[in-house]
Image: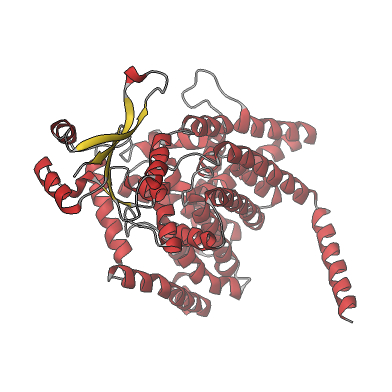
């Protein structure tokens, strides 16, 4: 009987699979997914052994500390812990840094899948396919997929959250989806702290659509309750580790204030950058044109606001939801944080691509109606190829998405390589209890698995000399990669009898006259 049941289940599953693949939209989607995987696996093999940046090392050193008990200095309480916790768990099962890099690809592919299914519900499968393709070649995602940063897992968990909210509170089709919103928000927040903006997005949406009746929705309260329960391990961890369950928020606010002071007036700081640089820099010309055309949906929402307010159009609800996913993060970063990085708006890009996809399919429908379907299909394909592969010579932002990603990945492929080599050398040439002084704290902690303190443990040379006598560090490392105190060169010159060069990494290994990019000194006692 058991074998018959298994055979029946197999036939049922095969029938469902055949039915799914009988839809040509789904076949195209699988092709897009394979294409996205091919691009990402190409960059994966190019970058699988590249050295870690500062931020990457922060998350991985914490993972190592949890998994193996190595030092965790360099990790501050303001950082999210989701990816570190996941890496620590995988470390216990024998995973390596290469495993984590491949995992980034899987999270990215998962985001493409969710964009397709979400787009199919909000609009239709043609628009969903277009948005999925745009994300598959999006240079920001291609780049962060090659770095062990929290953006891929943060976006994947955010899209899971959005999908359940849409099912549970927009379409109101699934109680389970609605109940999962709370726990999924906690997971998304722990994965990437900027996902904390989603409650604001959801609240504003429900305020417009359900108005005060939302507070009578039992599913909302169940979701909030389940989210509160899911948050208990998070608050318990910070209470045990730092003595304050809200320590991440406290530390994050302190860091933001310090960063604002340091970056104020700097090259990558200011509201204007989000209006003058971000549109062309992040979206590039092709997607930007489609998005600008898609702003007609926002105008339509405004012109039909009375209809929207009376809740007489599901379509207008969808427009509002998408634009809230764009506007609220944009306002937060452009007018509050003011620090500019294309990665910061990662949570908004799926909505942007869906709107851009709507524009392209509107053009397709127009050409199909006025000219011919074959002409419409060719124009859509050519435009998508233009976005992905075609460069515009002489234009400031004329590189294609693939070209932009490829250039960034290639240019930064060996950055911080000497620090990686120095860290591995220090691991082989030191004891577990040895102290190292260096400004490249996170990277050295990760690679050397030793306690590393910055030169900032002292405010001046005299205090540093006292600290050396007190702490007795074994090595000090100086390099061109980080800013050092002004007095450090004087200290080295004046203490030649107390220091010896243990290792050095030259700017040009074939030409010693160019000097070193990094020097490791050993203290003599």
Outermost residue toward the bottom in this view = 1
Relative placement, left or right, of 461 versus 93 is left
Q: Does 414 appear above or below 220?
A: above
The quadrant where residue 43 appears: top right
Looking at the image, can residue 17 be seen? yes
Q: Quadrant of the C terminus?
A: top left
Residue 234, horizontal then vertical, whole percent: 40, 70
Q: Does 396 appear above or below 172?
A: above
Q: Does 298 appear above or below 277?
A: below
Relative placement, left or right, of 163 versus 53 is right
Depth check: 488 or 209 in front?
488
Depth check: 158 or 69 in front?
69
Q: Residue at x 73, y 34 (%)?
A: 376
Q: Quadrant of the N terminus?
A: bottom right
The quadrant where residue 174 appears: bottom right
Q: Residue at x 43, y 47 (%)?
A: 56
Q: Residue at x 24, y 35 (%)?
A: 500
Residue 424, horizontal then vertical, whole percent: 42, 43
Residue 462, horizontal then vertical, whole percent: 9, 43
Outermost residue toward the left in this view = 462
Looking at the image, how many numbered discs can be counted on the residues? 0
Q: How is the rendered protein coloured?
A: secondary structure
Looking at the image, can residue 328 be seen? no
Residue 243, horizontal then vertical, whole percent: 27, 71
The quadrant where residue 238 appears: bottom left
């Amino acid at each position: 009987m058991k074998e018959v049941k298994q055979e029946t289940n197999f036939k049922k599953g095969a029938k469902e699979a055949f039915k799914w693949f009988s839809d040509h939209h789904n076949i195209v989607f699988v092709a897009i997914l394979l294409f996205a995987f091919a691009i990402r696996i190409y960059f994966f093999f190019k970058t699988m052994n590249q050295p870690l940046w500062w931020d990457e090392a922060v998350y991985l050193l914490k993972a190592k500390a949890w998994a193996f008990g190595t030092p965790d200095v360099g990790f501050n309480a303001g950082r999210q812990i989701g990816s570190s916790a996941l890496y620590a768990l995988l470390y216990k099962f024998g995973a390596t840094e290469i495993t984590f890099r491949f995992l980034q690809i899987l999270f990215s592919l998962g985001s493409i899948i969710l964009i397709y299914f979400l787009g199919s519900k909000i609009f239709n499968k043609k628009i969903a396919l277009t948005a999925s393709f745009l994300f598959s070649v999006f240079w920001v995602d291609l780049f962060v997929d090659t770095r062990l940063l929290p953006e891929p897992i943060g976006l994947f968990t955010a899209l899971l959250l959005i999908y359940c909210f849409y099912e549970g509170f927009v379409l109101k089709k699934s109680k389970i989806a609605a109940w999962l919103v709370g726990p999924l928000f906690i997971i998304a927040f722990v994965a990437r702290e900027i996902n904390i903006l989603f409650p604001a997005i959801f609240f504003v949406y429900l305020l417009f659509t359900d108005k005060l009746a939302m507070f009578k929705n039992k599913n909302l309260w169940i979701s909030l309750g389940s989210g509160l329960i899911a948050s208990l391990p998070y608050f318990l961890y910070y209470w045990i580790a730092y003595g304050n369950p809200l320590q991440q928020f406290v530390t994050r606010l302190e860091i933001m204030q310090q960063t604002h002071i340091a970056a104020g007036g700097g090259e990558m700081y200011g509201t204007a950058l989000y209006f003058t640089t971000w549109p062309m820099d992040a979206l590039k010309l092709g997607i930007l044109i489609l998005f600008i055309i898609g702003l007609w949906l926002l105008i339509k929402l405004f012109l039909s606001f009375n209809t929207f307010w009376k809740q007489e159009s599901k379509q207008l609800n969808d427009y509002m939801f998408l634009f809230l996913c764009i506007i609220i993060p944009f306002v937060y970063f452009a007018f509050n944080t003011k620090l500019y990085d294309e990665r910061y708006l990662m949570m908004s890009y799926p909505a942007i691509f869906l709107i851009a996809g709507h524009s392209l399919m509107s053009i397709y429908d127009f050409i199909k109606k006025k000219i011919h379907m074959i002409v419409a299909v060719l124009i859509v394909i050519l435009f998508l190829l233009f976005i992905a592969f075609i460069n515009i010579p002489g234009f400031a932002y004329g590189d294609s998405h693939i070209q932009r990603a490829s250039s960034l990945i290639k240019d930064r492929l060996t950055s911080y390589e000497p620090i990686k080599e120095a860290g591995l050398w220090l691991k082989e040439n030191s004891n577990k209890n040895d102290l190292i002084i260096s400004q490249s704290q996170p990277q050295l902690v990760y690679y050397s698995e030793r306690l590393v303190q910055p030169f900032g443990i002292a405010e001046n040379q005299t205090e540093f000399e006292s600290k050396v006598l007190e702490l007795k560090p074994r090595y000090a490392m100086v390099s061109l990669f980080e800013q050092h105190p002004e007095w450090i060169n004087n200290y080295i010159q004046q203490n030649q009898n107390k220091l010896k060069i243990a290792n050095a990494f030259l700017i040009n290994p074939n030409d010693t006259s160019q000097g070193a990019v990094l020097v490791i000194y050993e203290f003599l006692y």
